[in-house]
Image (cartoon, rainbow, N blue to C red):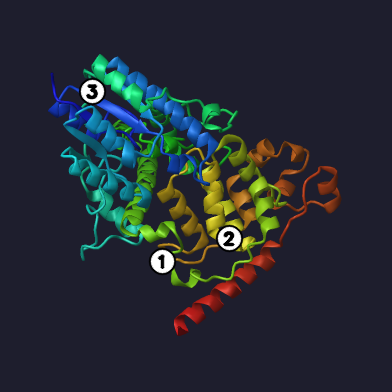
């Protein structure tokens, strides 16, 4: 009988274009997948019901994929630091393979699992799979990690990208006796949300699993990618890929995604279309920039990058924060975006920037409050991307232009000119004139009759106040 390799899945919930799984397959046909529902993650205060629903659906599809090729995915609800070594020892596995992570908790967990396995004489092999370029491959001329996106992008785009790795066609799984051992260890079926004590009754923006992600990628590359640069900032237009959750969980391989952009590029001679394809590639590079940043600067997960924000005098008004969370700020574009988030578990990227700027620059509330709320609600919530986006909006992160303040009215006028997005998510305001919806300039009496709140702050006044505090903080930091 062939020697057994366990493949530990985390952010690579597919058997196609999977670097670590492909490497295991090259060594033996007896490869079995493992996924641990980690109590540390499931019991976190930053777990989103929609994200868990998507994860569980992806696990079901992954299990079906394994069964189609003759093996299985073992699902266990346990601490992987103890369970993975215990499982490998019980099954007398030759080795455990997995793909690496950039998040501080994941890296600490993986070190502990590696140590335990090696103490038991079980081999480990790890690979980079979720990025086109692993941390350390894209460095400055001084061999340092980049802290600014633009030079990172210029370097990143010039580097050759790997092709998708071979697909798995035939595996062999556990014997009957081995399956019995795993069952005794607590193997479970993929649980339902209710079994985990979590509720999410709304539809997801993207169906779970590789097949749905692949279909979405093909649909996007056939049409929307050619107009991406023109349409991506308009939340009422279906102009983005909606693949963020699929990439977060590795439901589709990043090399397969990149290959699709190459095919789209080859199949068009339009300069405008190629410009749009390049714009979407830049978004893929932003994703990698934030992951590299978190890998090299793990302290980003715990606080601001810039010194002047270490002790910034935030107001942190709890009532204002609650109004922001519930979409009751009195600013239509902000409230429409927050309602989209709360109902669907997803928000258009332009709107993410608008609401983040409003929380930090208008309400003068610590960006980490918003970062946490996003992680509690987003079905595509990803630590690196979410933290990077919030620090960009708050002006506390790695960015040469440290102060941006979005005017909600001008953002709405520019990117939702017909108020189509606002009307969709705030139907109670649909009787108002477009200009009133965009500017928020309608009378207190009308607001009361429509059961819509008064503006909780004055944008111009808060803008001045934020700038004043920011300047004072910079001056204090320069003296200290």
Mark 2 burial class by Cα count in 10 Å: few <14, some 14-19, many 20+: many
The residue closer to the viewer here, 264 or 396, is 396
The residue closer to the viewer here, 347 or 37, is 37
* Marks 2, 1: nearer the viewer: 2
Q: CA distance from mark 3 to mark 2?
A: 47 Å
Q: On the rendered image, what quadrant is the C terminus found in?
A: bottom left
The disc label shown at residue 6, or none: none
Q: CA distance from mark 1 to mark 3?
A: 45 Å
Q: What residue did someone put label 2 on?
A: 360
Q: Position of residue 462 (x, y in %)?
A: 66, 66
Q: Position of residue 359 (x, y in %)?
A: 60, 57
Q: What residue did someone put label 3 on?
A: 168
Q: Viewed as shown, does residue 18 lie left or right of 374?
A: left
> Dividing the picture into quarters, in which one does residue 30 lie?
top left
Q: Are marks 1 and 3 in contact (CB under 8 Å)?
A: no
Q: Viewed as shown, does residue 226 lie left or right of 128?
A: right
Whether 423 is drawn above or below 392: the answer is: above
**Quick one: SS at disc 2?**
helix
Q: Are marks 3 and 2 in contact (CB under 8 Å)?
A: no
Mark 3 burial class by Cα count in 10 Å: few <14, some 14-19, many 20+: some
Q: CA distance from mark 2 to mark 1?
A: 18 Å
Q: Earlier in the sequence, mark 1 or mark 3?
A: 3
Q: Are marks 2 and 1 in contact (CB under 8 Å)?
A: no
Q: Position of residue 464 (x, y in %)?
A: 64, 70
Q: Earlier in the sequence, mark 2 or mark 1?
A: 2
Residue at 81 percent of width and 42 percent of height: 450
The residue closer to the viewer here, 301 or 96, is 96
Q: What residue did someone put label 1 on?
A: 400
Mark 1 burial class by Cα count in 10 Å: few <14, some 14-19, many 20+: few
Residue at 44 percent of width and 43 percent of height: 40
């Amino acid at each position: 009988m062939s020697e057994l390799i366990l493949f530990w899945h985390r952010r690579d919930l597919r058997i196609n274009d999977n670097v670590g799984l492909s490497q295991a397959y090259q060594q033996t046909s007896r490869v079995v997948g493992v996924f641990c529902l980690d109590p540390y993650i499931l019991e976190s205060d930053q777990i989103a019901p929609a994200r868990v629903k998507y994860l569980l659906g992806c696990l079901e599809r992954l299990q079906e994929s394994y069964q189609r090729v003759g093996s299985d995915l073992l699902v266990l609800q346990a601490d992987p630091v103890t369970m993975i070594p215990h499982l490998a020892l019980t099954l007398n596995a030759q080795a455990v393979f997995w793909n690496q992570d950039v998040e501080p908790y994941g890296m600490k967990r993986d070190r502990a699992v590696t140590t335990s396995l090696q103490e038991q004489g079980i081999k480990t092999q790890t690979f980079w799979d979720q990025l086109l370029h692993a941390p350390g491959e894209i460095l400055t001329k001084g061999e340092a990690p980049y802290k600014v996106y633009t030079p990172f992008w210029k370097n990143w785009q010039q580097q050759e990208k790997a092709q998708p790795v071979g697909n798995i066609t035939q595996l062999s799984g556990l014997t009957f006796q081995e399956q019995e051992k795993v069952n005794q260890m607590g193997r479970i079926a993929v649980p339902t949300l209710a079994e985990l004590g979590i509720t999410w009754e709304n539809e997801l923006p993207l169906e779970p699993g590789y097949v749905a992600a692949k279909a979405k990628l093909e649909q996007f590359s056939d049409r929307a990618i050619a107009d991406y640069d023109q349409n991506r900032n308009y939340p009422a237009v279906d102009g983005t890929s909606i693949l963020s959750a699929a990439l977060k969980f590795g439901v589709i391989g990043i090399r397969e995604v990149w290959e699709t952009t190459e095919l789209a590029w080859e199949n068009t001679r339009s300069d405008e279309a190629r410009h749009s394809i390049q714009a979407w590639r830049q978004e893929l590079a932003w994703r990698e920039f934030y992951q590299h940043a978190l890998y090299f600067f793990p302290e980003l997960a715990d606080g601001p990058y810039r010194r002047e924000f270490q002790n910034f005098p935030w107001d942190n008004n709890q009532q204002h924060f609650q109004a922001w969370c519930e979409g009751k700020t009195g600013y239509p574009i902000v409230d429409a975006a927050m309602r989209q988030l709360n109902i669907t578990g997803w928000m258009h990227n332009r709107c993410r920037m608008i609401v983040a700027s409003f929380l930090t620059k208008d309400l003068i509330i610590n960006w980490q409050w918003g970062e946490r709320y996003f992680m509690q609600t987003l079905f595509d919530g990803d630590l690196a991307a979410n933290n990077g986006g919030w620090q960009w909006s708050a002006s506390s992160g790695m960015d040469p232009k440290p102060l941006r303040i979005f005017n909600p009215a001008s953002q709405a006028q520019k990117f939702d000119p017909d108020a189509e997005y606002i009307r969709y998510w705030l139907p109670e305001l649909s009787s108002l004139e477009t200009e009133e919806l965009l500017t928020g300039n309608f009378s207190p009496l009308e607001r009361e009759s429509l059961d819509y709140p008064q503006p909780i702050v004055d944008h111009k006044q808060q803008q001045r106040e934020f700038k004043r505090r920011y300047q004072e903080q910079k001056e204090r930091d320069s003296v200290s």
